[in-house]
């Protein structure tokens, strides 16, 4: 029977090891035995917490997606002159999350359509972000701060899914102008402001971090 200390640290060690390994090889090549070895836990400890590799990936993804959802909360809570700054700050946070969890998010973005365990949290995150953005659109229009236009829910879904695809391209690399996650900040800020207000940023590139 594994020692109590090993059982206590096993989940975090397994999750961290899995993300490290994903940076080295594709998800479909990753094996439970490799995760166990990299995490420094016993096989029984692994299966005391996770029933499969898919379960580990799903938990890693759930945590990363929770960070992304939280990163967008300042945008959804701001409906005044601070909105542009909030959008930019949230996207910077999103980029930093992608830098920490890039291999995981790229693997999940490619695999979720065929894997329910990945698809459910992925779609739940996008639904939450889109719903918050739709409420923001409704509020802005009701206060006369944004013009009438496309249905708020449809507009928000398009913006959110557009962000998701751009993120995948940036994580995969190779697209001109989107060499890394940090490159998404200004283009997506302009996309969102354009979608909400039909305008470009008031201060393009304001406060871009080196």
Image: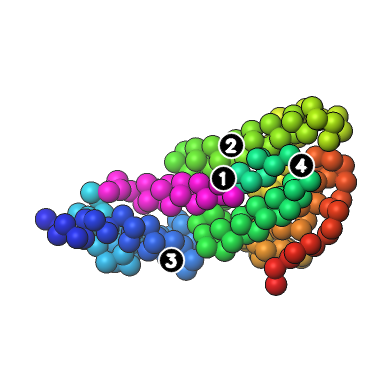
Quarter residue 36 falls in? bottom left
Label 4: how many Cα within 10 Å (few below 14, some 14–19, many 20+):
few
Would residue 125 be found to the left or right of residue 208 on screen? Answer: left
Q: Which residue is mark 1?
A: 69
Residue 67 included in the magenta stretch of the image: yes
Q: Is residue 109 above or below residue 76?
A: below
Cα gap from disc 1 to disc 4, whole angstroms: 21 Å
Mark 4 or mark 1, which is nearer the start of the sequence?
1
Cα gap from disc 3 to disc 2, whole angstroms: 28 Å
Mark 2 or mark 3, which is nearer the start of the sequence?
3
Q: Which residue is mark 2?
A: 128
Where residue 126 appears, as percent x and y from the top left, is: 60, 40
Q: Which residue is mark 4?
A: 80
Colour theme: rainbow
Nearer to us of marks 3 and 1 is: 1
Most prominent secondary structure in the magenta stretch? helix
Magenta span: 49-71
Mark 1 or mark 3, which is nearer the start of the sequence?
3
Nearer to us of marks 2 and 4 is: 4
Q: Which residue is mark 3?
A: 20
Cα gap from disc 3 to disc 1, whole angstroms: 23 Å
Quarter residue 39 falls in? bottom left
Mark 4 or mark 3, which is nearer the start of the sequence?
3
Nearer to us of marks 3 and 2 is: 2
Residue 9 included in the magenta stretch of the image: no
SS at badge 4: loop
Where residue 79 appears, as percent x and y from the top left, is: 73, 39
């Amino acid at each position: 029977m594994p020692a109590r200390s090993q059982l206590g640290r096993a989940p975090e060690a397994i999750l961290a090891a899995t993300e490290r390994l994903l940076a080295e090889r594709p998800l479909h090549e990753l094996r439970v035995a490799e995760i166990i070895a990299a995490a420094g836990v016993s096989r029984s400890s692994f299966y005391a917490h996770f029933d499969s590799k898919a379960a580990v990936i799903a938990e890693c993804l759930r945590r990363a997606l929770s960070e992304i959802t939280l990163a967008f909360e300042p945008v959804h809570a701001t409906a005044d002159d601070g909105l542009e700054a909030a959008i930019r700050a949230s996207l910077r946070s999103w980029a930093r999350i992608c830098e920490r969890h890039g291999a995981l998010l790229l693997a999940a973005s490619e695999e979720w359509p065929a894997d329910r365990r990945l698809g459910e949290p992925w779609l739940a995150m996008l639904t939450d972000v889109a719903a918050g953005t739709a409420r923001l659109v409704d509020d802005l229009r009701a206060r006369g701060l944004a013009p009438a236009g496309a249905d708020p829910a449809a507009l928000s879904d398009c913006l959110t899914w557009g962000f998701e695809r751009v993120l995948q391209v940036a994580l995969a690399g190779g697209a001109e102008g989107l060499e890394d996650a940090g490159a998404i900040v200004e283009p997506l800020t302009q996309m969102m402001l354009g979608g909400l207000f039909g305008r470009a940023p008031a201060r393009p590139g304001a406060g871009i971090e080196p």
